């Protein structure tokens, strides 16, 4: 297997965090390689309308935003390789990134592998993702002004986001498989006391239906064993989020949910290894926070390499 030397930084992941890291690292004069196994841009590419990314008065698609990021990173010299990574080996200033075709020796690594929302795995979910199916009310809630939406889940995130959605939607259904919510008591009280919110108890969504966009849900009540339809303009799914930590979970310090723990400089517990974006332990997962993480990680890595230049071969 060919071994390719002399990269200063390898960025693992081609979403907003990884692309921003590529921009800052390569613009800073570092020889930078970015690896992405799938579509450049990450999860945001499935979002048809992004209204809250600073600097763009007009609504852009997630693909448009990340395509601009990609072109900017390449303009400054980031080399993008679309290939799956088999393994990472961390060794100060001599890390190894192994793909199916080659081994890359790099001085520092920025992990921007992202996270995936847990899915229901039902009919219509994939088809309508970005067209009525969402996993982020903060991202997409404003698109549903005066409309009717459903939130699936009964934990803190689901109930908090249902309350948030009442700022825009005229009606918010919480669909929960049990007869009581799992969110903290105060959050439950706020939701149950909100006239815009109605809870559909003991129920699960069996299918998502529509034409071009979501129009209705097929609901199954576990107690009555009856199936009904609910007309909605959108559905927000909050049944968990899974960090993509497979490459690092035995080496990098993680929190209880599996997210990478970093300091304010996005440095992990391993010298020269940084993390950014949705895979990191944080309170807000948005394009803008991912991009900020990537910029901080690249800047911090550049400073770390400068501090350790006398130890580099």
Image (cartoon, helix red, strand yellow):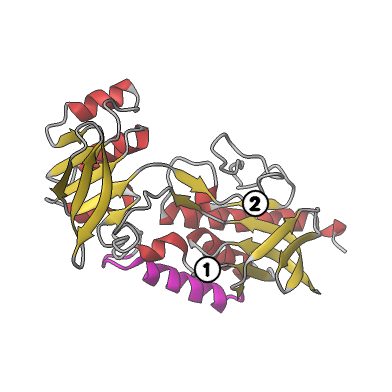
- Total tally of numbered discs in the picture: 2
261 over 34 or under it: above or below: above
Q: Which label sits on residue 210?
A: none
Q: Which residues are drawn in magenta?
A: 56-77
- Tell me if residue 141 can be seen: no
Q: Could you tell me which quadrant the C terminus lies in?
A: bottom right
Q: Residues within 10 Å of mark 1 (few under 14, many from 20)?
A: few
- Seen in the picture, residue 159 relative to 266 is either above or below; the reply is above
Magenta span dominant secondary structure: helix
Badge 2 marks a residue whose secondary structure is strand
Instruction: Please tell me whether mark 1 or mark 2 is closer to you in this view.
Output: 1
CA distance separating discs 1 and 2? 21 Å
Residue beneath label 1, please? 38
41 to 289, vertically: above or below:
below
Between 271 and 245, which is closer to the camera in this rendering?
245
Q: Nearer the viewer, residue 312 or 109?
A: 109
How packed mark 2 is, by other alpha carbons closer than 10 Å (few <14, some 14-19, many 20 or more), is: many
Give percent across and percent down for residue 195. Answer: 11, 32
Residue 261, above or below 93: above
Q: Decide: marks 1, 2 in contact (CB < 8 A)? A: no
Q: Quadrant of residue 312?
A: bottom right
């Amino acid at each position: 297997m060919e071994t390719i030397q002399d990269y200063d930084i390898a960025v693992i992941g081609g979403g907003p965090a990884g692309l921003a890291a590529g921009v800052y690292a390569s613009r800073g004069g570092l020889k930078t390689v970015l690896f992405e196994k799938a579509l450049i841009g990450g999860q945001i590419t499935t979002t048809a309308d992004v209204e809250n990314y600073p600097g763009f008065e007009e609504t852009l698609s997630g693909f448009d935003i990340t395509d601009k990021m990609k072109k900017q990173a390449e303009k400054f010299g980031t080399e993008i390789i679309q290939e799956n990574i088999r393994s990472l080996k961390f060794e100060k200033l001599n890390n190894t990134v192994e793909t199916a075709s080659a081994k890359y020796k790099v001085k520092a690594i920025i992990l921007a592998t992202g996270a995936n929302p847990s899915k229901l795995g039902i009919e219509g979910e994939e088809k309508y993702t970005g067209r009525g199916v969402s996993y982020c009310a903060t991202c997409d809630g404003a698109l549903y002004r005066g409309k009717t939406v459903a939130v699936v889940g009964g934990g803190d995130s689901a109930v908090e986001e249902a309350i948030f959605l009442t700022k825009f939607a005229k009606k918010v259904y919480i669909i929960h498989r049990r007869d009581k919510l799992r969110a903290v008591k105060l959050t439950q009280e706020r939701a149950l006391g909100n006239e815009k919110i109605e809870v559909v108890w003991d129920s699960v969504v069996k299918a998502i239906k529509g034409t071009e966009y979501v129009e209705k849900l097929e609901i199954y009540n576990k107690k009555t064993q009856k199936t009904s339809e609910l007309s909605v303009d959108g559905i927000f799914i909050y049944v968990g989020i899974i960090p993509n930590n497979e490459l690092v979970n035995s080496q990098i310090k993680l929190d209880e949910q599996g997210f990478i723990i970093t300091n304010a400089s996005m440095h992990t517990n391993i010298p020269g290894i940084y993390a950014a974006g949705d895979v990191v332990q944080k309170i807000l997962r948005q394009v803008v926070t991912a991009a900020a993480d990537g910029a901080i990680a690249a800047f911090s890595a550049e400073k770390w390499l400068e501090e350790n230049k006398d130890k580099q071969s």
